[in-house]
Amino acid sequence: MDSGYLIECASLLLRWMHVIFAIAWVGSSFYFIWLDNSLKPPVDAALIEKGVGGELWAVHGGGFYNPQKYLLAPPTLPHELHWFKWESYSTWLSGFFLMGALYYSQAGVYMIDAGSAIQQPGVAVMTGIATLVIGWLVYDGLCRLLFNHSQLLFGAIYYGFVVMVGFVLCHLLSGRAAFLHVGAMIATTMSANVFFWIIPGQKKMVAALRTGQTPEPIHGKRGKQRSAHNNYLVLPVIFCMLSNHYPFIYSGPQAALTLATLLLAAALTRHFFNLRHKGIYKWQYPAAGLALLVTVLVTHAPQAQPVVSAPRLTTLADIRPIIDTRCLACHSEKPTKMPTAPNGIKFDQDDAVRLNAPKIYQQVVQLKAMPLGNLTGMTEAERGQISQWFKDGAK
Ligand code: HEC
């Protein structure tokens, strides 16, 4: 079977799995955060007697639910306990393999662009993987160092680190790979939190309880802190993961600043929801997040193109050589830079070029997203010609 087709299949299956696992992970994590923040101290004396510190009544899907959280632990632990861990591990694993199938196997197209400092695909892949490892080591080091300091201080320092990584990666790699790796770096710390600290801590607590000892409080405290971090990091990560579908967001000289702004907007929004679960409404947080978002969108709006009065109409014959040299390397029956034509868009036939005229105008002139990473070295004059052709009716 054709290798390009195999990559497409792998990408489809891995992406599908990745999204399903992530929904399961984020869903259960949002549920527990909401539950924890919504619990009320029990009034029933029997519950207080049992050691219940908070409870809640809910109705869902035709049934009534009454979750209860123990202040420490129930007097005897039930034999069967549900652990939440595979949601997290499977999200990370599928994400890593998806990154491999798309980015690491086609690093020359996806991880490098005309302006990136790194130009060798192998070096780009190593940089991407190193980012994941270094990100975890720095995060974990910060957590140990600032264990007893406020969440706010920790958040500020970690946010500073993430922004710095964003700037470095946007310089070294294509904007698209940089954004995705910032997201993957944060997501790696989230899964590693579960793997290295939260689950082992819980195991120690359960082991102590089963042998009649009192668990050391450090495990609970650390687990809580790490899951609070995870909770704030979810929305920024999801933004990074989706960003690669919107070239206007990750291209241009200000890409790293855009990333920093949008990560902040996401975390502020999450903060609002966390407070809201506790009945505190601080509208300034989502308002600030929205203001940041709107600022980014407004400042990214494409500039109006000057209308040049040409002596005659620009036709397909004028731009055909541009399409041939700048686009066919990827968008053709037999592309040389990619295994298959991306999004199935091929410009071998004149009709296909005419049919895609609005998209070509948008991608080449307005967003400057194509040629991808300007790997084929399109000039501004050529963009101007495409623009003129489109305005002359794309004949
Ligand atoms: C180095 C490879 C490469 C080159 C060269 C390239 N493209 Fe693309 N193009 C892509 C990829 C990859 C996508 C898929 C979109 C994505 O993943 O961001 C794409 C998508 C598109 C789309 C579809 C966007 C959408 O929203 O569906 C259009 C239109 C397009 N390219 C036009 C062009 C034109 C016109 C040129 C030449 C000026 C060009 N491309 C050159 C790789 C390339």
Image (tube, rainbow, N blue to C red):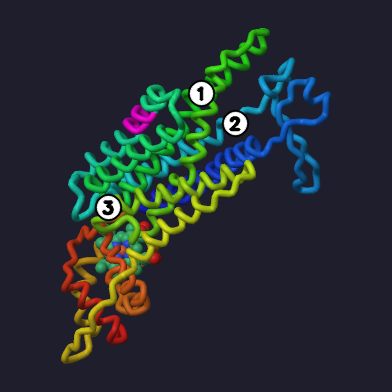
Above or below, comparing residue 386 to residue 287 in the picture: below
| Label 2 vs 1, first from the N-terminus | 2
Task: Indicate left or right for 267 with 130 as reference.
Answer: right
Q: Do the residues labelled 2 and 1 touch (CB within 8 Å)?
A: no
Q: How far apart in space, not on screen, are marks 1 and 3 (Cα)?
A: 42 Å
The one nearer the camera, 303 or 20, is 303
Q: Mark 2 points at which residue?
A: 84
On whether residue 181 falls in the magenta region, the answer is: no
The residue shown at (30%, 63%) is 369
The one nearer the camera, 337 or 43, is 43
**Amino acid at dot 1:** Arg
- What crowding class fits label 1: few (fewer than 14 Cα within 10 Å), some (14-19), or many (20 or more)? some
Above or below, comparing residue 235 to residue 251 in the picture: above
Task: Indicate left or right for 204 with 323 as reference.
Answer: right
| Label 2 vs 3, first from the N-terminus | 2
Magenta: predominant secondary structure element?
Answer: helix
Q: How far apart in space, not on screen, are marks 2 and 3 (Cα)?
A: 37 Å
Image position, residue 181 (x, y; %): 35, 43
Q: Name the residue under label 3.
A: 109
Ligand 1 lies under 8 Å from the Cβ of mark 3:
yes
Q: In which quarter of the image is residue 58?
A: top right
The residue shown at (22%, 39%) is 123
Task: Indicate left or right for 92 with 116 as reference.
Answer: right
Image position, residue 247 (x, y; %): 34, 59
Q: In which quarter of the image is ligand 1?
A: bottom left
Q: What stretch is highlighted in magenta?
A: 133-139
Image position, residue 45 (x, y; %): 83, 25
